[in-house]
Amino acid sequence: PRLCRRPLHSLPQPPSFGIAFDIDGVILLGHSPIGGSPQALKRLYHDSGSLKIPYVFLTNGGGVPESKRALELTKQLGVNISPLQVIQGHTPFKELVKRFENELVVAVGKGEPAEVISEYGFKNVISIDDYASCFENIDPLAQYKNWRKVQATNCDMSLRSDPVSQRVQAVFIVSDPIDWSRDIQVLCDILRTGGLPGRAISYQPPIFFANDDLAYQALFPAERLGMGAFRIALESIFNSIHPNAMEYTSYGKPNPVVFKNAESVLMQILSSSYHNHLMNGGLKKPFKMLYMVGDNPAVDIKGAQQAGHPWYSILTRTGVFKEKGNHADYPADLVVDTVEEAIDYILMKEQ
Ligand code: G3P
Ligand code: MG
């Protein structure tokens, strides 16, 4: 059959730029949209509803699988968001599947931490709630935690064998921990005994944090303590009860690897949105500009700066940063009041 190709000039040209949006403090506060985010994001789509400008959400938050988060964001923002567009703090944990595929690993944090990493391919995962419930009296304060009594936790029997006699080979802090006192207690038990709570002091199994944010912006007017604050608390207690200092790995922004990965995801999104153009002999060119729109100078802006070309940083005033001018230590390339202003600026500059 003869191939009928539309001439290249009549096809919509792929943009030479992409955008990464932080979520907390830029797009949402708690579960509510802020800064005109729904109407502003709409401008990144064609009238047909298909994606015009490649963009991702690059958040240090998480706690639910990317597919579920994409559905939640679609509902909250009224635009169609695909799981590929959602990069969460814990998304890079996928890379560790090979190392711990069949090992017992403990998942910590709000939401569905065990489901998140099971979906990545880890096969022997237990949440810290269920793990703690396997050990009688592991948390002496549990009897005073009325809110825990209504929560159904069970010692998970879907695991390959009894979690009490199995060594925990790694711990994943997937999202912000809820019960700091219980979690610090149980994690110290795991980390100081080679993964066998209640046994003798031994080596420390690896612990991975999805981010190292000291603080983030939620609904309360002042910043809230984040996973980085939890890490400091755990580390300082662990270091007081164990001969060797806690070893850990943190993911998330401002790590340059996160920005490299976002760039390659944006390229994948561009390729699938402009598939016809490429099929017709259009060349896949690297991005001329990538915009990071964030609210946290030490995380979003520092990260974009460290990542270098082609990243351009835009700081909003709807989250952690609220000052008039620019940030003193991590000045952004541009400071705006809201994400809507950021999108106005980008579209005006790129047209
Ligand atoms: O817990 C979430 C927080 O640490 C940061 O989220 O979207 O501002 O990167 P985000
Ligand atoms: Mg933020």
Image (cartoon, rainbow, N blue to C red):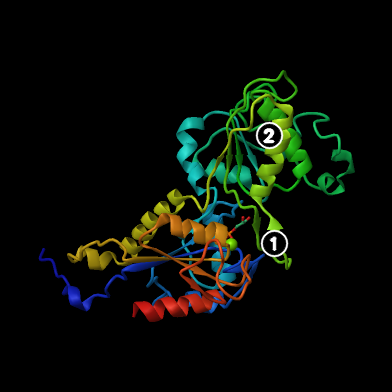
Q: Position of residue 137 (x, y in %)?
A: 83, 30
Please, which residue is most extreme toward the front here? 328
Q: Secondary structure at mark 1?
A: loop
Query: Residue visible at 64% across and 52% down?
Result: 214
Figure disc tally: 2
| Placement of 293 over or under 244, stated as above or below | below
Residue 107: image location, x then y, percent? 63, 40
Residue that protrudes farthest toward the top in the picture = 200
Residue at image position (31%, 66%) is: 288
The residue where tag 2 is placed is 156
Q: Which residue is mark 1?
A: 223
As drawn, 161 above or below 174: above
Label 2 sits on a secondary structure element that is loop
Q: Is residue 305 visible?
A: yes
Assign the N terminus to one quadrant of the image. bottom left
Q: Amino acid at mark 1?
A: Glu
How far apart marks 2 and 1 lie (CA) works out to 35 Å
Above or below — where is 311 with respect to 171?
below
The residue depicted at 25 percent of the width and 62 percent of the height is 285
Most extreme residue toward the left, as rendered? 2
> From the viewer's perspective, is the residue at label 2 or at label 1 nearer?
1
Can residue 155 be spotted in the picture? no
Q: Is residue 116 above or below residue 130?
A: below
Give whichever of 162, 310 is nearer the camera. 310
- Left or right, 291 with respect to 223, comes to left
Report the amino acid beneath label 2: Asp
